[in-house]
């Protein structure tokens, strides 16, 4: 028997409706990056994923509210993203409150202080799967995300695994989830659902 997969990418708030014939799903939730203030970069948005096993339709409601966190602005935090109450990922802190990366399964990179580059984050051996990079402090570069360089937006495979790099000083965070450099906005988050169907 063959297995068919369908990928659904949500870049704004929506509702997921459980389809007929569904066998299982994977969910990847990424939050918004924080914005930098005059001196400190914003933190990258966190990443959450169902790590133990695929989710069975028997444990899912008929509808699930999807929240996609917006990138931070004016030194403020990025918004959290969620797949109902099943998976949540917090946004990165804004530079005004220190620029820490969002903290969950895969944390976002910390924003750099003045003259300090944003933090690069990775998920270890699974380097394609990482949260948003931290924004660079005043005069400094942004941090990377896994194999994605700082400042990169819409990297290859952003729809299902790779996140954006943190912005350099004065530059916005890379989409999705990158923290903004000093004086710049963070990137929006994204929610991805991969549905699996069994075919005869």
Image (tube, grey):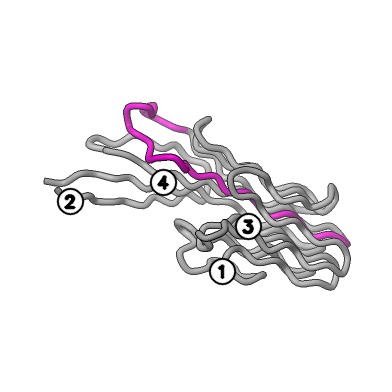
How crowded pointer 2 is (Cα within 10 Å; few <14, some 14-19, many 20+) is rated as: few
Q: CA distance from mark 2 to mark 1?
A: 32 Å
Q: Which residue is mark 3?
A: 132
Q: CA distance from mark 3 to mark 4?
A: 19 Å
Q: CA distance from mark 2 to mark 3?
A: 34 Å
Which of pointers 4 and 1 indicates the residue nearer the eye?
1
Mark 3 or mark 1: which comes first in sequence?
3
Q: CA distance from mark 4 to mark 1?
A: 22 Å
Q: Which mark is residue 147?
A: 1
Residue 91 screen position, x and y as percent: 67, 46
Circle 1 — which element? loop
At 73% from the left and 58% from the top, the residue drawn is 185
How crowded pointer 3 is (Cα within 10 Å; few <14, some 14-19, many 20+) is rated as: many
Circle 4 — which element? strand
Circle 3 — which element? loop
Q: Is residue 79 visible?
A: no
Residue 140 screen position, x and y as percent: 81, 72
The one nearer the camera, 117 or 95, is 117
Queried whether the magenta region covers residue 62, the answer comes back as yes
Q: Is residue 188 left or right of residue 185?
A: left
Mark 2 or mark 1: which comes first in sequence?
2
Q: Is residue 97 left or right of residue 31?
A: right
The one nearer the camera, 12 or 193, is 193
Residue 134 screen position, x and y as percent: 71, 60
Q: Which residues are magenta?
A: 38-64
Q: Which residue is mark 2?
A: 2
C-beta proximity under 8 Å, tags 4 and 1: no
Q: Is residue 48 left or right of residue 118?
A: left
Q: Which residue is mark 4?
A: 193
Q: In this rendering, is residue 155 above or below 29?
A: below
C-beta proximity under 8 Å, tags 2 and 4: no
Majority secondary structure of magenta residues? loop
């Amino acid at each position: 028997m063959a297995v068919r997969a369908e990928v659904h990418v949500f870049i704004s708030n929506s509702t997921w409706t459980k389809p007929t014939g569904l066998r299982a799903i994977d969910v990847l939730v990424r939050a918004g990056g924080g914005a930098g203030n005059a001196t400190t970069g914003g933190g990258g948005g966190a990443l959450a994923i169902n790590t133990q096993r695929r989710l069975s339709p028997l444990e899912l409601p008929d509808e699930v509210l999807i929240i996609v966190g917006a990138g931070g602005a004016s030194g403020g935090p990025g918004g959290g993203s969620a797949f109902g109450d099943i998976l949540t990922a917090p946004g990165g802190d804004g530079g005004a409150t220190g620029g820490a990366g969002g903290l969950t399964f895969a944390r976002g990179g910390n924003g750099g202080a003045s003259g300090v580059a944003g933090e690069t984050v990775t998920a270890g051996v699974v380097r394609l799967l990482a949260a948003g990079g931290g924004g660079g402090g005043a005069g400094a570069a942004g941090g990377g995300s896994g194999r994605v360089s700082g400042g990169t937006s819409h990297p290859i495979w952003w729809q299902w695994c790779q996140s954006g790099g943190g912005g350099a000083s004065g530059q916005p965070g890379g989409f999705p989830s990158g923290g903004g450099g000093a004086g710049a906005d963070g990137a929006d988050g994204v929610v991805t659902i991969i549905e699996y169907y069994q075919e005869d």
